[in-house]
Image (tube, helix red, strand yellow):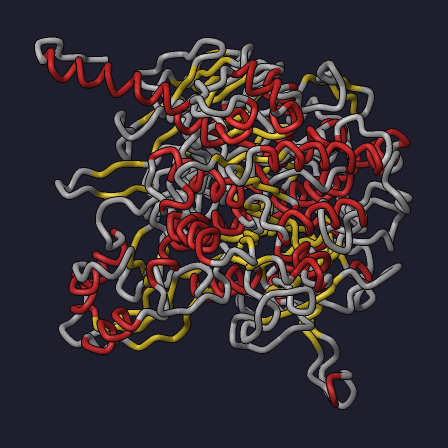
Amino acid sequence: MNMKTKHAPAVTWFTTLSLILSLCAGISFTGSTAAQSPGRKTAPETAAQFAAIYPSLTKYATDMTRLASLNKLERIADHEADVARVIDALTRDASKDPVVIGESDLDRDSIARGVAFRIASGNVPEGLRSKRVFSLSLDAISKDAKTSQEFESRLQAVIADAEKAEGRVVLFIDKLHEYAGARATNVATATLRNVITMNRFMVIGATTPEAYADYIASDESVAKLFQPISIDHLNDSAADSTTAKTNRRARQSEEFEGDKISPDLRELMQSAGSNDRVTAILQVDDVQSAEVNSLLARHSVHVDARLPQLGAMKVELPAKAVEALAKSGLTNYLSPDVKLESFGHVTATTGTDQVRNSPGLLAGLLGASAIDGTGVGIAVLDSGMDTAHDAFTTGSARIKFSKDFTGENNTTGDPYGHGSHVAACASAASYSNGTSYQGIAPGASLINLRVLNSQGTGTAAALLSALNWIISSADPTKPVGSTNPLNKDKYNIRIVNMSLGAPAISSYKNDPICRAARALVDAGIVVVAAAGNNGKDANGKKIYGQIHAPGNDPSVITVGAANTFGTNARSDDGVASYSSRGPTRSHWTDANGVVHYDNLLKPDLIAPGNKLVYAESDAGSSGLLGTGLLGSPVSLNALVTQHPELDSGTNENDNTRLMYLSGSSMATPVVAGVAALMLQTNPKLTPNMVKMILMYTAQPLKGWNMLEQGTGEVNAEGATRLAKLVRTNITSTTKQDDPMLTTTSAPDPHTTIASQTFSWSQGIFFRHQYAKGTSLITKYQTYYAQGAALGDGVVTTNGVVIGDGVVIGDGVVLADGVVIGDSIFTSAGVVIGDGSVFLSGVVIGDGILLADGVVIGDGVVIGDGVVIGDGVVIGDSSVLAMSAMVQGDNTACMK
């Protein structure tokens, strides 16, 4: 700290102010103590005195206002408008208390924190200035309670303490439905109802939209006591641009950076004629804003689609108008509507077979007969699915919903052939040759969102429309509720698989696809994306820096391809030569024209992806009524038609054929399937927990560096075993370093597959560093919460290794025993950070630049994407990617 001591008056004032604040932090509830000592003022209680007067309130609730006064409460800047709405509800209508309704535990908790900070600073109406916000902990009040009566007794004791404070308590009750309404006990409901009816003290309730609809709104005697305040803003007035802006920032904590026009769009502008028009993705705070609409009309901009949940629009506009829109102050970012392209034994080599019928993992899963992803929905955004194929119909129909965003209106077929193969990797049933061609999670449900057309290409706009649909209400014209849930909840979409991508040119902070992916992660959805197939040039030389979007986003699980050489044993496994390598080369440009590369460590891990055999879709028949009669028989898909060698020859009948495909496209659904197994064994895992566990349990492959394999090859056995051990009662109130597992010690960090035992990596990636240590799994880390991302607030400089237990960044504490490093290692095949140094401290942030064309280690760093006149990002990379999908590495493979 730099302190200028020569300004004595300022120091004196600072000291005085500190004393005043410390006294304010100890302000007591004088009402009850005054009753005991009439006629004299009572000094503020000490912590011990306070606990003696209010024992249950102290034991089961946290005084957030006091922590805010002492600067010991983490400040969350989002949701200012929502905090104001809650404060208004508390002061305006004494007959109704506010209930905050939101998907994220973290978002709901941030509202209570915001109220506490406002009270602590005095920035509230007079009626709230003497009050204190206490957060009631469901974990604490229910811990070791053996009966519902014991729980009720504790709740009544807390209520009695709060009443003793004579109206000075504001009790924040998250998961309100556990205390009142159709789910709660009659005694608990009556206790809380009496408090609010008699206006004994103020309550801020909080719960999810589904819980509110099912348990609160359905009980009229409870519902009438509360004023619902939605913080997800799915149906708020479109004209409320301030609220919309607050909502967007709550969903996506990364602010836009630098130039508002993407580099590839700038190149398009320079090559365009004076009257040329371009198709672009425009990101704004509010897609329905009257000001924005007026701006677009003035510049002859045509809006093709509005995506309100993502704050994005597909627009067609004069090239000369792009600059004016960027400078208007009403827009966030403009980028081209780029073309998307697909990248394109397993249950044994991933450890899935060991998981399938494990008694230990099945324990406690009511009605489950196998660990197969049952109850988990996987949305596959690809070229569609052949809904009649046996891979998806054997046993039971796994495809629960289909929607086409390409304009071809095909919801039952996959004429290109990529999407069916991808979906089968994740969730194919066993219908041929035993379990050889079974998907990783055959019990999972599939949601078929078609974004690639019959030629295997698509647009950013189509992909964004599909992502927007997932987090929109089933009927967008009606309020969200039990009869009109969000699509993600209606189909229980816990995982999104994107075996596709676009060149990662714009920084993940600005790129519309990356920002959309982060919005889904913040909504509780695991997003898995392909790294890409551009790991080598036309001469077979390694290249680095070709991770594609949205795989360049830190919240996404980015998957590269491994080559298993067709064996179950993993001792011969390696990274496929074509698998895209990190670091990410997306970037933003500041006002001085300086380019800042993201330089994130990617991929996160790898999975089998070379020459996998899974479902081969039919293209459909052209005969009478689609039967093949009086016309051509059922035709083969486009990929097999162009490359007959892809057909495996395993089956010749329609709806049973199998084909080979290779690439990170195939590896991605393998990881998505493993995530489904994890979520079946422990549905309470957040997306960040899933990502952490996958990286922590992966096997580092000897001889491959972190920019090639991430933390290692996916390990379904280890990941599912560790997922089962994670506590299911972790909430937004769980503290840093609280126990994370149901056991007192870490599990054995080894897995045996095909009689070979290997070590887990025992580490994870942040954005520019890796971390390792058992405390990552034994002690809860706040960045595992929903709404955060691994690496949020974790900052180091100059390549320094952070010691144990040091506070870094904006207050994130890494637990004792966790070591941070930023050198890139070529693994010795043991744990993360072992082996020889490949690069030392190079990718720690944009302060150290790897220029395009620089030779590093065994390859070359290159930029991503070449722009030509029509706005399609192409070049050698797309040709090489297609080659990888068709040919793969010419080695021994799955048969």
Drawn side of residue 120 relative to residue 370, left or right: left
Q: Is residue 107 above or below residue 577?
A: below
Residue 667, horizontal then vertical, whole percent: 62, 42
Q: Is residue 300 above or below residue 859?
A: below
Quadrant of the rendered image containing residue 725: top right
Question: Closer to the camera, 409 or 572?
Answer: 409
Drawn side of residue 527 relative to residue 748, left or right: left
- Report whether residue 283 is seen: no
At x 50%, y 37%, the residue is 168
Quadrant housing the N terminus: top left
Question: Closer to the camera, 148 or 864?
Answer: 148
At x 39%, y 59%, the residue is 244
Drawn side of residue 283 relative to residue 617, left or right: left
Drawn side of residue 576 relative to residue 121, left or right: right
Residue 648, horizontal then vertical, whole percent: 74, 53
Residue 597, horizontal then vertical, whole percent: 30, 36
Number of marks in the rendered image: 0
At x 61%, y 43%, the residue is 174
Quadrant of the rendered image containing residue 201: top right
